[in-house]
Amino acid sequence: MDRVPEIKTVEAPEGIEGAGFFATSLEKVVGIARANSLWPLPFATSCCGIEFMATMGSHYDISRFGSERPSFSPRQADLLMVMGTIAKKMAPIVKQVYEQMAEPRWVLAMGACACSGGIFDSYSVLQGIDRIIPVDVYVPGCPPRPEQVLDGLMRIQDLAKNESFRRRNSPEYQALLASYNIK
């Protein structure tokens, strides 16, 4: 029988407690809120899209992780989930979708094809989406199991929870975006 990951409870951030009050930093509270309310934008092609549908179903229930509202508008999403084979003709569209997303934004590459081109080493298939946009988490597999997708989502949650407000304005992050020719 498949083992489904256990429901994760949200731990209180470090802070000062007393009778009737709790004080912590705004950055920690915002991090917890971001991590537990991700709105994914699924960019799915081929078989990885079917596995993502299974992850959304009642058996695996991605909504347990605060991601029950998939957004099909880049302006309302903060997690781009690229799944499956990406043809080179689709690359400008994926990049445009990424650029239309508001900061902070994260990218999850799901499946061997999105991560590295998979078995399709041809002129028409992009050999990994990290050639056009920065990727935060890779979920390998052909196609990956729903448990792997949930693990990848939990890793994105960890990134969202622990990211400082200043990271997106740092020279390192700006240089990363510039290396992808993203403004």
Image: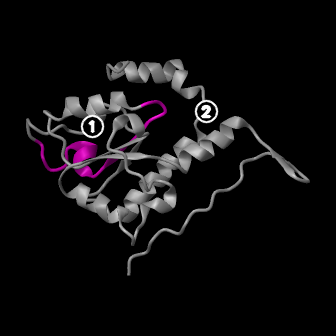
Mark 1, secondary structure of its residue: helix
Q: Which residue is at 34% across, 32% downward?
A: 98
Q: Which residue is at 43% across, 75% downward?
A: 3
**Residue 149 numbered mark, or none:** none
| Side of 169 relative to 151 (left or right) | right
Q: Position of residue 83 (x, y in %)?
A: 27, 49
Crowding at label 2, few (<14), some or many (≥20) Cα neighbours within 10 Å? Answer: some
Task: Work out how far the residue at label 2 is from the one at label 1, CA to CA, in angstroms.
Answer: 25 Å
Crowding at label 1, few (<14), some or many (≥20) Cα neighbours within 10 Å? Answer: many
Q: Position of residue 85 (x, y in %)?
A: 18, 46
Q: Which residue is at 25% across, 39% downward?
A: 128
| Side of 63 relative to 130 (left or right) | right
Q: Is residue 8 part of the magenta span, yes or no?
A: no
Q: Is residue 2 above or below residue 31?
A: below
The residue indicated by pointer 2 is 164
Lower position in the chain sequence, tag 2 or tag 1: 1
Outermost right residue: 19
Q: Which residue is at 61% across, 42% downward?
A: 31
- Callout 2 touching callout 1 (CB < 8 Å): no
The residue indicated by pointer 1 is 129
- Any part of residue 145 in sight: yes
Q: Position of residue 17 (x, y in %)?
A: 86, 50
Residue range highlighted in magenta: 102-121
Residue type at mark 1: give it: Ile
Tell me the quarter of the picture where residue 79 sits: top left
